[in-house]
Amino acid sequence: MACLERASPALKEVLLKLHRAEIPREIDHHIYEFGSVKYHIQASASDPYHVYLSVSTPLLSQGTVAVDSLPHSTLETVKRFYSDIVEVIEPQRGGYQLTLRLNFDKLPHGKECIKVISNISSVQALILSSQLKEMLWNLGSQEISQGTYKPIKLVYHPREPFFVIRLPQKITAVFPMRFRDSTDVIIATAFFQELMDAGCSEACAKAPPCTWSPIPPPELRGEPFEDLSTNGGFVSFDIFSQHVEGTKLDKTVWSLLNFSAYVKYHVKCTRGFIQRRMRKRLENLSEVLQISRTGENELNTEVQGYRCMRKLIGLSKPKNFRRKCGTFTKKFKRIHSPIKIHGFDRFRQRWLKIPKCHSFRRNKLD
């Protein structure tokens, strides 16, 4: 969620460390953040009260006209916002749109110091907000077509343009939503429907009304086809006068600029949550299967042992005796005497031959 905060957490941490350092030190630090935002911080031990901060950020452009440098009105807004503590250096450092010199000797003490450094860390949000506010005010001077104002195409990220239409009583912001994966489309569609349902509740009665449609709204008729070809539909917000009063203006502008980033963040978190739940469910099922297999193996072992005991017990004593004698006889026949006696075979056949008992068998049969 760091990319959705107005103040950069990394920039704020570095500036606080420089301000609280007891011994001045040299620093030449680069910070890269989401959305191609880059900061360059330089400080010298010989001049500890001055820190140079250079900022590079994608600028908000209108239509296909790319903007590389800050407009004069944005520079004036930055000067008015920071007053004596921050000084704008012209020309800026190479590769950056803005270079500031921070006067640490003019910073207040205590909690006010942290507040001022937080405001300095939100310089990128100040630049974009001032650009969008100026474009919204300039919408009033455009030509009226069929009772409504023509939509203006605003580009913050090259692949995520959105449209702003100024009507007599409100300003409508339309976001074409595009996703690379079909799973992301399903999650985002469910999120948009829940957002519409939440907007109809009493708790969100003061929030700008939100609508989602899979087809382009009527206000975008006549726009190029490539701008209206989406797979996630169109999300529209109606902004009325009560949403831009006082300090609400900055919050509303910043929310519009980061709506696409918030949707991508929500989809990514939801997808990660679903995957974690699926892995946890798979682990639980694997444990159940493993326990069931272990129980079956133990049962099979017990059954096999029981059957072996039944077989051993089932054998009668005479059968068991004859079986052992047969085994002993087979082993005895395999034995060959290493000493051979000549003539012993004829002697055994003649004198050691067991006579057959025919009379005994005949008497038994009779």
Image (spheres, grey):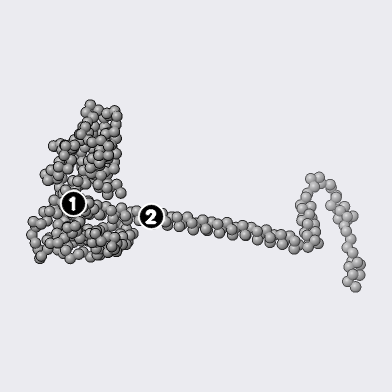
In the rendered image, residue 101, in percent from the top left (x then y), is placed at 19, 35
The mark found on residue 264 in the picture is: none
Q: Measured from the top left, where is residue 53 in percent x and y?
A: 21, 37
- Left or right: 349, with 143 as reference point: right
Viewer-proximal residue among 116 and 281:
116
Residue type at mark 2 is: Phe
Q: Is residue 11 visible?
A: no
Give the Cα distance between marks 2 and 1: 38 Å
Q: Residue 211, relative to residue 137: is it above or below? A: below
Would you identify the image quadrant in which residue 355 lies? bottom right
> Which residue, given by chain and number where applicable, does mark 2 sit on?
273
Q: Amino acid at mark 1?
A: Gly
Q: Dot 2: what SS?
A: helix
Rendered image quadrant of residue 136: bottom left
Q: Nearer the viewer, residue 357 or 18?
A: 18
* Residue pictured at 23% horizontal, 40% vertical: 116
Q: Which type of secondary structure does the marked residue at label 1 adopt? A: loop
| Horizontal and vertical percent position of residue 158 | 21, 52
Q: Residue at x 26, y 32 (%)?
A: 27
| Residue toward you, 300 or 289 | 289
Can the viewer see residue 337 in this picture? yes
In which quadrant of the rendered view does residue 234 lie? Answer: bottom left
- Dot 1 corresponds to which residue? 246
Q: Is residue 313 above or below residue 130?
A: below
10 Å crowding of disc 1: few (<14), some (14-19), many (20+): few
- Which residue corresponds to the image point at 33% horizontal and 54% vertical from the top-left? 268
Compared across the picture, whether 323 is left or right of 278 comes to right
In the rendered image, which quarter contains the C terminus?
bottom right
Q: Residue at x 80, y 59 (%)?
A: 321
